[in-house]
Amino acid sequence: MNSKKSNRGDEVKNRLSADLTQTDIATPVRSMHRRQFLKTGAVVAGTALMAGGLGPIAARAASTKNNLPPNTPEWMLKQGHPIVTPPYGVPSKYESDVIRRPTDLTPTDISSWSFTPLQDLHGIVTPNGLVYERHHAGVPAIDPAEHRLMIHGMVDNPKIFTVEDLKRFPAVSHFYFLECSGNTLTEWVKPKGKTVQSTHGLLSCCEWTGVPLSTVLQEVGLKHGASWLLAEGADAAALDRSVPISKALDDAILVYAQNGEALRPEQGYPLRLLLPGFEGNMSVKWLRRIEVGDKPFMSHEETAKYTDLMPDGKARILTFVMEAKSVITSPSGGHRLHDKGFHEIRGLAWSGSGRISRVDVSVDGGRNWRRAELQGPVLPKCLTRFRIPWEWRGKEAILQSRTMDDTGYVQPTLKQLVAVRGTHSVYHYNAIQSWHVAADGEVTNVHA
Ligand SMILES: Nc1nc2c(c(=O)[nH]1)N[C@H]1C(S)=C(S)[C@@H](COP(=O)(O)O)O[C@H]1N2
Ligand SMILES: [Mo]
């Protein structure tokens, strides 16, 4: 997926390397002697950017040499484009390869996935246009004026709410990750995904706004003995899942906005359920009906699918929580390190059980570990960004991250995971990911 990028990087690297001494390549810009910096300034700046994974910037700079100092770049010689073109802003055209990517694993693109480009993102928030997608019957085009949420079953006052009704309730906003329990499913037996987008990209993190489900359940009144509910979507799949009342009364949200604007159609416009830390499948999109009952409803999605086949031939069912997991996003599969010396290893950690308490990073396949820095705020059931400095000496390395959450749970190695779960499972893969760095800087997915 990054091949375009790395090729561009390679070209520049080839063109630049003629001008560079070995010392220049190995010296971090910050500590470089001023005279030396001036002598090789433009070239070194480009190289340093590539070292940080910003290959395309260096590539562009080199391909438009006339725009480089001491010249005045062409974009300073005329005025820019006027405001509100377009009225809804879009990223720079130079970011056009930062996109969701589909999979070739599904026979149709109606019931399929698209993956978030984790390798290109910064911080913890997923921009709305890059949030991963999982639809079982495509994206319905719902007119919010004709959408309703019906709540019935074991309640005192069954009700039908409009979206506007729900927006009148006191609102909350929280940052939570959303992960498909099928995330990383290709990796059980062999390392398959080429990039972190394809291995871990069924993962996103937004600020979700809506009304707590507990508030609305209070409005309709739960009958004595009510202990489960069924949430149903208004798509052609009519996807439905059972939710324990304890979760519904805890942190479940009826969501109508993500990252400050209305939900995107792909994310469930105009209304979705969000169950923080639970498998993505249960956060029912295009939510139209909640039925309250006293036992799980045993829908297709929680019996035929979304169960975990164990080594003894029995299947675990109703496995809700997404357990602690982490992954290095830079450098990661498809990247290429061009320069020895300083690199910042960056990644994401998350846990459906609570807060991330720690991330350790190994560069030797798990023999030695160093503690990474966690970027605040460290929020519960939210992505947490970690970073750690690394001096690459141009030798082979195996990069791994291992996280722990505030329950004390430690992310397993693949061996530990398979010892318990076997290899017949599809969902809930959360083993430590390994990226192999070759002596030539090429980064690939391996099992270590
Ligand atoms: N109604 C409905 N809800 C749904 C789905 C669906 O197909 N239909 N897919 C589920 C699955 S499997 C996941 S992982 C998440 C994906 O949410 P997203 O597309 O907003 O990332 O929505 C869940 N909710
Ligand atoms: Mo999913």
Image (cartoon, rainbow, N blue to C red):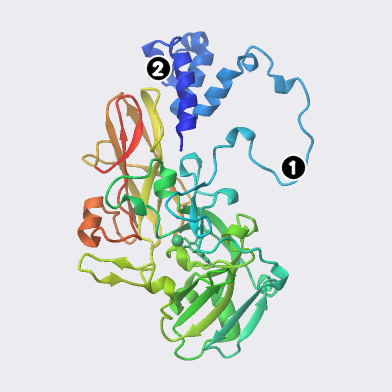
User: Secondary structure beneath disc 1?
Assistant: loop
Between 67 and 12, the one nearer to me in the picture: 12
Q: Position of residue 257 (x, y in %)?
A: 62, 61
- In what element is the residue under mark 2? helix
Please state the horizontal and vertical placement of residue 261, each as a whole percent of the image: 66, 56
Q: Residues within 10 Å of mark 1 (few under 14, many from 20)?
A: few
On residue 51, which mark appears? none
Is residue 250 left or right of 235 when viewed as pictured? left
Q: Residue at the location (56% across, 18% down)?
A: 62
Question: In the image, what residue occupies the spot 74% across and 42% down?
Answer: 86
Vertical relation: 105 (above or below) 328 = below
- Which residue has dot 1 on it? 86
Q: Is residue 418 left or right of residue 153?
A: left
Q: Residue at x 51, y 75 (%)?
A: 231
Whichever of callouts 1 and 2 sits on the residue coming sooner in the sequence is 2
Distance Cα–Cα, label 1 vs label 2 = 41 Å
